[in-house]
Structure formats: structure tokens, C-alpha cells
Image (spheres, rainbow, N blue to C red):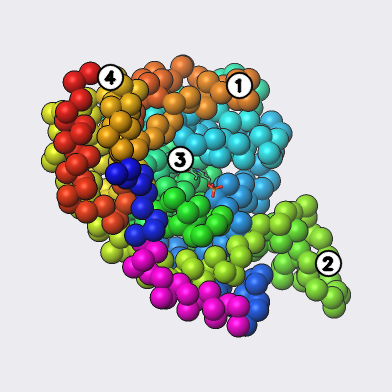
């Protein structure tokens, strides 16, 4: 029998009655765009992660772009980010006209290495062509980057810090969420993420009310905000007074309603995911080149369970033959992709290059039962490649 990589059907079986009721409520009230569930979800997301404010939007990519746009980052600016990530982390930077600068990761956790970040900032400053403006750290595979160290670097150089928590919404470091250290936290509700909708969605968390207001304007076509209207006399709908060039990036009410149900189950799902991860670690240690390391004091949401193997592709074929799917995140680091070839990657990125050749992710979801997981563990152990 072929196993699912992420068993969304099992989750739906657990939550279906509540989801049906939530969807029916939206069909009944009919406010499909910016309906009451959207604000309710924003309040709940902020509370879940200890942020003052949350702003929902159409997807996780826009959630990264919105703070960059709101801060006026643009041509001539540098935004530092890891190369070992999904393309969305970097692609929003050229949207603004700025340049991504690719930085290496820490061995073991795959998150942005603060020492490499510092070196890259100094390199870009010395070169003098680009102005450092912001850092995007990624909570890769579900765990927090080293935010205390990254925030210290950001502060020293006067840079904004964004947490790309598309995979790590809900993750903590010393019981504290990334918003404690970051100026903005972006997340995604793509269905396969730990907190997934039934379509696209995203959100930005921030403690900065002025930033929230500018992003709220940008997500609705640059509509005039309360601050924009101070002293103005405009009696029509705010979106018909364009205060800035914005975009259309709203979260559908239906997705907000579904996410409210999923958020109720989310804390328990994080616990279950950690149980699955612990069982993998116990079963696989010594049989593969590396099982995942989590930063000291960190609790991961385990978006992925990623191991390393010298013959990663051989292991994938061996598991596939037994009906066990795997995935490779990410085989080609961003600085090696043709569309990013002209952007800097100071010092080369040796840890990134090595990880891209060796990583392989195993099935991971909160409904993975012990017997099924033992089947996966035994199959991995049985590979002699
Ligand atoms: C999924 C993901 C995104 C983008 O989210 P979308 O909702 O698909 O736009 C950004 N960064 C990382 C690290 C991701 O995994």
C-alpha cells in the first residue's frame, strides 16, 4: 500500500463536522471577501504567537513581500536571506527592485548562520554597491532560526528582520515565538504547511501598528488608511483613494473559517508531530548520516522530517519501491538557480551545497500512527546503499 507523504485526509476526518459547520456559516452570511471570520482569525493568530497584530493575506509569498513594500525597500537595497529555502523567500526581493544576497546556513539545523550573515553584511558594505536594509531568516522544516543571535546582528547594522515562518508557524525558542525578535513574521497556509487551509493563504505578524496599517493598505490596492485621511476630506470608500501602489492580497473568508477550526486543533497537532519526530529519531539514529538537530531550547512544528544520507537518491528509490514516498527539499539551492545567478552569494555557501546533495524528507504529519511509522523506519534501516 502506498503511504501518503502528508495525510490531509486523516486530519479532515477528525475535523470534518466543524469544518462543514464553519463553511456553511460563511455560505449563510455571504461575506466572501473580508468577512467577519477574517478579523476573528487575525486576532487568534496574533494571540497564538504572542504578537500584538496579525494581517492575513492571499499567500505566504505576499506575506513576505508586504513588509518589504511597506518599508519602502527597493532598487539599490540588499536583503540577506538563506539560499537553502523555497524560492519564495528570495523571489519577493527582486519584486521590489532590491537584490537578494544569499547567506550560508548552520550545519545540522539548516537555518541562517549568524556568523555568515555578519560576514556577508560586511562584504556588501565594503563593496559599496548595495545598501543593506533587511534580513529574511527562514524557520526551515519547522524550527526557529537562531533569533537572539540574528536579532543582535540586525540591530548592530540597523537592519529590519523578517522571520519566514511559512514552515514554522507555532515554533518556539525558549518558549518564545519569533515575533519577540523579528520586526515581522510571515507565514503561509498552503495546505501542506503545518497550519494549512484548503487553498492558498498567508499572514504577517507584527507588534508595529504603523506597519500593520501600511500593509493593510498595500493588500487592498493601496487604499487610503486612517492616517492617510487625516486632514483630508474624502467621503467615499477608502479603496477609491489610492494612497500608494498596492496589490490584491486578501485571505478568502472561507479559508479564514476553515483555519479557525484548524487552529483549534493546532497546539495538539504540534505535540503529535513532536511525538512522531522523537520516534523517528529513536528508530533511525545510527542508521542514517544525520537525523535532525533542533536548536537548544527550540520546539519545532516539524513541517518536514529531514534526514541526511550519502546516497539520498538510492534511499528514495528503495523507499518508493515499498510504497513509501519521500521528498527532497531542496535539491538546487537558490544561488544555483538560473534566475538568481546575478545576485551575490559572498564567500560561497559550502554548508548549503552539501545539504542540497544529502537531504531527504520522510512522511511527517500529526496522524502518522506507530505501526505505519515503524514500517517506514524499518524500510530505511533495510537500505544498504
Ligand atoms: C511555502 C513557503 C513560502 C511561500 O508560501 P506560499 O503560501 O506558497 O506563497 C515561503 N517560504 C517558505 C520557506 C515556504 O516553505
Secondary structure beneath label 4: loop
User: Rounded to the nearest whole Å, what is the CA distance between mark 1 and mark 2?
Assistant: 40 Å
| Neighbours of disc 4 within 10 Å: few (<14), some (14-19), many (20+) | some
Dot 3 or dot 4, earlier in sequence: 3
Q: Which element is circle 1 on?
A: helix
What residue is shown with label 4?
A: 310
Disc 3/disc 4 C-alpha distance (Å): 27 Å
Q: Which residue is mark 1?
A: 338
Q: Quadrant of residue 267?
A: bottom left
- Tell me which numbered mark, 3 or 1, is placed earlier along the sequence: 3
Label 3: state its secondary structure: strand
Q: Which residues are magenta?
A: 11-28
Q: Magenta: predominant secondary structure element?
A: helix
The yes-or-no answer for disc 2 within 8 Å of ligand 1 is no
Residue 187 showing in the rendered view: no
Q: Upstream in the sequence, badge 4 or badge 2?
A: 2
Q: Which circle, 1 or 2, is nearer the viewer?
A: 1
Which label belongs to residue 308? Answer: none
> Label 4, label 2: how many angstroms apart (C-alpha)?
58 Å
Query: In the picture shown, does residue 46 fall above or below 204?
Result: below
Q: According to the image, label 2 marks what residue? A: 240
Image disc number at residue 137: 3
Amino acid at each position: 500500500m502506498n503511504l501518503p507523504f502528508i495525510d490531509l485526509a486523516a486530519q479532515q476526518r477528525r475535523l470534518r463536522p466543524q469544518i462543514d459547520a464553519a463553511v456553511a456559516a460563511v455560505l449563510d452570511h455571504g461575506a466572501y471577501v473580508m468577512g467577519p471570520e477574517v478579523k476573528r482569525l487575525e486576532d487568534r493568530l496574533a494571540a497564538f504567537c504572542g504578537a500584538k497584530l496579525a494581517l492575513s493575506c492571499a499567500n505566504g509569498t505576499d506575506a513576505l513581500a508586504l513588509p518589504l513594500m511597506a518599508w519602502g525597500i527597493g532598487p539599490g537595497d540588499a536583503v540577506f536571506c538563506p539560499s537553502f529555502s523555497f524560492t519564495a523567500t528570495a523571489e519577493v526581493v527582486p519584486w521590489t527592485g532590491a537584490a537578494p544576497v544569499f547567506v550560508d546556513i548552520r550545519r545540522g539545523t539548516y537555518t541562517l548562520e549568524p556568523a555568515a550573515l555578519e560576514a556577508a553584511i560586511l562584504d556588501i558594505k565594503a563593496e559599496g554597491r548595495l545598501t543593506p536594509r533587511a534580513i529574511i531568516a527562514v524557520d526551515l522544516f519547522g524550527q526557529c532560526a537562531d533569533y537572539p543571535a540574528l536579532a543582535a546582528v540586525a540591530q548592530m547594522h540597523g537592519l529590519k528582520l523578517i522571520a519566514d515562518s511559512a514552515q514554522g508557524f507555532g515554533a518556539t525558542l525558549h518558549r518564545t515565538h519569533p515575533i519577540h525578535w523579528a520586526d515581522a513574521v510571515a507565514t503561509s497556509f498552503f495546505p501542506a504547511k503545518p497550519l494549512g487551509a484548503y487553498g492558498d493563504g498567508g499572514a504577517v505578524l507584527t507588534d508595529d501598528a504603523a506597519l500593520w496599517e501600511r500593509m493593510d493598505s498595500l493588500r487592498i490596492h493601496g487604499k487610503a488608511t486612517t492616517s492617510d485621511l487625516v486632514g483630508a476630506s474624502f467621503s467615499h470608500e477608502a479603496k477609491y483613494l489610492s494612497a500608494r501602489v498596492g496589490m490584491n492580497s486578501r485571505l478568502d473568508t472561507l479559508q479564514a473559517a476553515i483555519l479557525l477550526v484548524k487552529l483549534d486543533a493546532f497546539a495538539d497537532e504540534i505535540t503529535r508531530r513532536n511525538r512522531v519526530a522523537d520516534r523517528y529519531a529513536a528508530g533511525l539514529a545510527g542508521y542514517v548520516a544525520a537525523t535532525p538537530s533542533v536548536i537548544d531550547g527550540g520546539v519545532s512544528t516539524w513541517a518536514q522530517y529531514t534526514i541526511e544520507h550519502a546516497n539520498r537518491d538510492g534511499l528514495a528509490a528503495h523507499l518508493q519501491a515499498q510504497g513509501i514516498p519521500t521528498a527532497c527539499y531542496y535539491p538546487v539551492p537558490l544561488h544555483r538557480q538560473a534566475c538568481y545567478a546575478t545576485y551575490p552569494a559572498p564567500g560561497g555557501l559550502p554548508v548549503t551545497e552539501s545539504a542540497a546533495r544529502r537531504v531527504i524528507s520522510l512522511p511527517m504529519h500529526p496522524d502518522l500512527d506507530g505501526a505505519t511509522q515503524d514500517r517506514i523506519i524499518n524500510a530505511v534501516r533495510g537500505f544498504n546503499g
